[in-house]
Amino acid sequence: MAAEYKTIHPVKYYRDYLAHDVRPDGRAFQKFRPASVNVGSIKTADGSSLVKIGNTTVVCGIKLEIAPPKAEEPGKGFFVPNVTLPPLCSPKFRPGPPSDQAQVASHFVAEVVSNSACIDLGELCIVPEKLVWVLHCDLYCLDHDGALLDACVIALIAALRTVTFPVVEYDADKDTTVVSEKKRKSLTVHSAPVATTFAIFDDDILITDPTTEEETLSTGLLTIAVQGQKLCSVYKPGGSPLSEDQLQDCISKARKRAEQINQLVETALNPPER
């Protein structure tokens, strides 16, 4: 009977739970789903990670390419993020060109990396005006069950911290390039931003880490990216407004969660000895 009621009246079904200060999956309003991080799972990539938040699963693979720099930025390399949401991850996505949500996710990831200055594009320069590194960062969603932006940012930062470069030697006289795969150096990641998503219900109820169902039924969404005490990016695609106190509360919760996530990533990168 409950399944039929949920199908016919999904919003009322959900709000009946909210009225009792609990969510259908048993979580309290401010409870996060379990998260896990694995790194180095793609052997053919120059850096990789796999992140799960509840059922949401995102894999990130990074490939390096040598290319000429932009004329207006001769001493800087490139960072190219791309989020893919295939039909495999959710029935609401179809084959074909990138969906609006995929494009929004790619833009958000690029904005977070830029605002947090977690990588220095100047350090990607091999020979000024001649050669630079391009970081192709492909984020592929295997299962979409809410908080996609959170998973993408965590997966990207974890993968960036595993990237290693081959040593490149450039002979200006002969205009030749020699790449030594045996000698590699790590990419310097200067900061570790973390994104946290909140769902808004009826202007007065805020829940953290929403599932896809909760995102669909909510009256508004908010994603906050922080790096330490710094606010890197805020994404709110319309919906219910937030008061100043509610926004500050969300920022505070995002900062606390960032500490936990960064510790999780650190453990994945440097597992304790058994």
Image: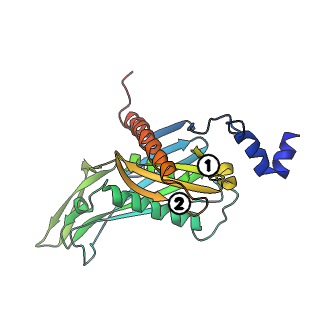
Type of amino acid at the residue the image marks with label 1: Asp
Q: Among all residues in the image, which is located at the extreme bottom? A: 71
Locate residue 137, reporting x and y percent: 42, 58
Q: Which residue is the site of mark 1?
A: 204
- Looking at marks 1 and 2 on the same chain, the residue that comes earlier in the sequence is marked by 1
Residue 236 is tagged as 2
The reply, left or right, for residue 188 in relation to residue 23 is: left
Percent across and percent down for residue 33 are 57, 38
How far apart in space, not on screen, are marks 1 and 2 (Cα)?
Answer: 16 Å
In which quadrant of the rendered image does the N terminus lie? top right
Residue sitting farthest toward the right: 1
For residue 187, side relative to residue 255 (left or right): left
In the rendered structure, are the residues bearing label 1 and label 2 in contact, judged by CB atoms less than 8 Å apart? no
**Vertical placement of residue 112 versus 248, above or below:** below
Q: Secondary structure at mark 1?
A: loop
Residue 153 image point, x, y percent:
45, 51
Mark 2, secondary structure of its residue: loop
Quadrant placement of the C terminus: top left
Could you tell me which residue is drawn at 53 percent across and 60 percent down? Answer: 236
Q: Residue furthest top?
A: 274
Rendering quarter of residue 228: top left
Residue at 28 percent of width and 75 percent of height: 70
* Residue 75 locus on image (x, y percent): 21, 68
Q: Residue at x 58, y 68 (%)?
A: 100
One can see residue 151 in this view = no
Q: Within the image, what quadrant is residue 216 found in?
A: bottom right
